[in-house]
Amino acid sequence: TALLEINHLSKQFGNDTKALSDVSFSVNEGEFVSIIGPSGAGKSTLLRCINRMIDASHGEITFDRIDVMNVKKKDLKKVRTKIGMIFQHYNLVNRLSVIENTLHGTLGKKSTLAGVLGLYSQAEKEQAIRILSLLGLEDFIYKRADQLSGGQKQRVGIARALVQDPRMLLCDEPIASLDPNSAKTIMDHLRTVSTTMGITVLVNLHQVDVALKYSDTIIGINKGQVVYNGAPKEMTKED
Ligand code: ADP
Ligand code: ADP
């Protein structure tokens, strides 16, 4: 069954930049979907519309039967906890520790306060440590974020999303800043999140080979339009 449905979605920036035009597709519960396309194709705009970081111009987004585009500002937080976001540049708070960054996903603006750990229950901390350990970060829990490698930082990004118990992860170029080994580790973890935890994963990639290897479904986007939507094995060179 579809967890996410996008219908006739468009996004216009200013008067001339049409970042998305008439985009429609659906994503099933637990599916691993890669969105591929050249730089400027609209991939990042699409993910930002889905979690309402930006507002689409036209169309419909239905997530878990919620009409996302019409959710009131005050109710957005509830929707966003179900939709985790992973960024290319990790977006960690450098001077906070790994576990503080992991928990801070639920903290919003207060995250700039010192003493983040004191704001959480023992159970929340134990849950964070469990997730960090699943991601191979058990030796880094109290290290500062700025002492980590890029691949380790991205694993913290995944942990921060997972502690919220999301239904879906939106990953915007999660491996674009990583070396091939770290990129593989991150993709393996994202695949596990989908296959083992049953969390739906939507990931923007510009590497077609990676998308072919990991995805159930590939959506190709060019100039704001869907130009391919299907299984990796059915994709030909021309696509
Ligand atoms: P991709 O993620 O595929 O590289 P983007 O979604 O970032 O593509 O960008 C799609 C198009 O929308 C590009 O032409 C980009 O310059 C434009 N764009 C993205 N964000 C904004 C913005 N905030 N204001 C104006 N134009 C934007
Ligand atoms: P990405 O690497 O995800 O494609 P970009 O580097 O294109 O992102 O964009 C970084 C930021 O700049 C985003 O907040 C995006 O919305 C904004 N942006 C991108 N293109 C434009 C543009 N043409 N005009 C204004 N803002 C833009």
Image (cartoon, rainbow, N blue to C red):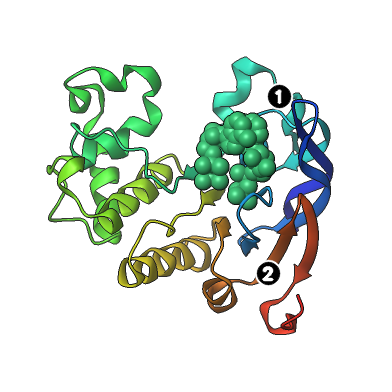
Q: Secondary structure at mark 2?
A: strand
The answer to whether residue 44 of the structure is visible from this angle is: no
Report how far apart the C-alphas of labels 2 and 1 lie in the structure. 28 Å
Label 2 crowd bin: few (<14), some (14–19), many (20+), radius 10 Å: many
Residue at image coords 69%, 18%: 72
The answer to whether residue 103 of the structure is visible from this angle is: yes
Answer with the quadrant where ligand 1 appears in the image.
top right
Q: Left or right: where does residue 14 sit relative to residue 126?
A: right
Q: Left or right: where does residue 156 sit relative to residue 118?
A: right
The residue singled out by tag 1 in the image is 71
Instruction: Nearest to the eye among marks 2 and 1: give it.
Output: 2
Callout 1, which amino acid? Val
Q: Is residue 218 above or below residue 129?
A: below
Residue 167 locus on image (x, y percent): 56, 48
Residue 150 locus on image (x, y percent): 28, 54
Residue 151 locus on image (x, y percent): 29, 58
Disc 2 Cβ-to-ligand 1 distance below 8 Å = no
Residue at image coords 73%, 80%: 235
Label 1 crowd bin: few (<14), some (14–19), many (20+), radius 10 Å: some
For the residue pair 198 and 135, the one nearer the viewer reads as 135
Q: Left or right: where does residue 141 sit relative to residue 232?
A: left
Residue 217, numbered label:
2
